[in-house]
């Protein structure tokens, strides 16, 4: 009986280690993944504010670049609707799904009516391809989780 209890304990412990989100990463590896994903996302936001959509396209993952041409992507994103100030991006959080996949959540500010900023909580799935963090070009800034209101 004690052997069965010990086996159950080991199985439960192993399950928690595997599904705990740590994925066997060292704290340094986790920090590197988080900081690299955040840096890439902030770069994409900066490129948008500069209306350099052809460069944003290069951050697309292979699958989305196969589905949408650069010309179509650029024409669909002719203008950046993001707020022009420090309000653009706040409260960035990264959840590591695997060493090659993260969910980045952020509070993004968009230009609203009458000069106001409208905030949305977005989530962006990013994948690591060829050593670079990539986005889905169908949703370059992420998918809106909810509206947070006006400035």
Image (cartoon, rainbow, N blue to C red):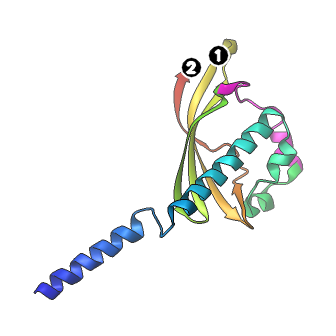
Residue 83 higher or lower than 105, as above or below: above
Residue in view at x 60 percent, y 24 percent: 118
Residue 131 higher or lower than 91, as above or below: below
| Dot 1 and dot 2 residues touching (CB under 8 Å) | yes
Crowding around mark 1 (Cα neighbors within 10 Å: few <14, some 14 to 19, many 20+) is some
- Of callouts 1 and 2, the N-terminal one: 1
x, y percent for residue 98: 54, 65
Residue 105 higher or lower than 80, as above or below: below
Residue under circle 1?
116
Residue under circle 2?
150
Q: Tell me the element at label 2.
A: strand
The residue most toward the right is 71
Residue in view at x 73 percent, y 63 percent: 63
Residue 21 appears in which quarter of the rendering? bottom left
**Considering depth in this image, is 14 or 114 the residue closer to the camera?**
14
Residue in view at x 89 percent, y 48 percent: 71
x, y percent for residue 68: 80, 54
Residue 62 appears in which quarter of the rendering? bottom right
The label number, if any, that marks residue 27 in the structure image: none
The residue most toward the top is 114
Identify the magenta region: 71-86
Q: Is residue 139 visible?
A: no
Q: Tell me the element at label 1.
A: loop
Left or right: 56, with 106 as reference point: right
């Amino acid at each position: 009986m004690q052997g069965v209890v010990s086996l159950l304990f080991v199985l439960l412990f192993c399950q928690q280690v595997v599904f705990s989100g740590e994925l066997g990463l060292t704290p340094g590896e986790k920090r590197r993944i988080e900081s690299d994903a955040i840096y890439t996302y902030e770069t994409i936001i900066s490129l948008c504010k500069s209306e350099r959509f052809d460069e944003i396209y290069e951050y697309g993952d292979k699958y989305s670049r196969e589905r949408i041409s650069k010309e179509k992507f650029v024409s669909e994103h002719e203008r950046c609707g993001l707020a022009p100030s420090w309000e653009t991006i706040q409260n960035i959080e990264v959840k590591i799904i695997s060493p090659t996949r993260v969910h980045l959540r952020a509070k993004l500010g968009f230009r609203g009516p009458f000069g106001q900023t409208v905030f949305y909580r977005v989530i962006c799935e990013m994948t690591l391809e060829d050593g670079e963090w990539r986005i889905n070009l169908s949703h370059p800034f992420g998918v809106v989780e909810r509206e947070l209101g006006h400035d």
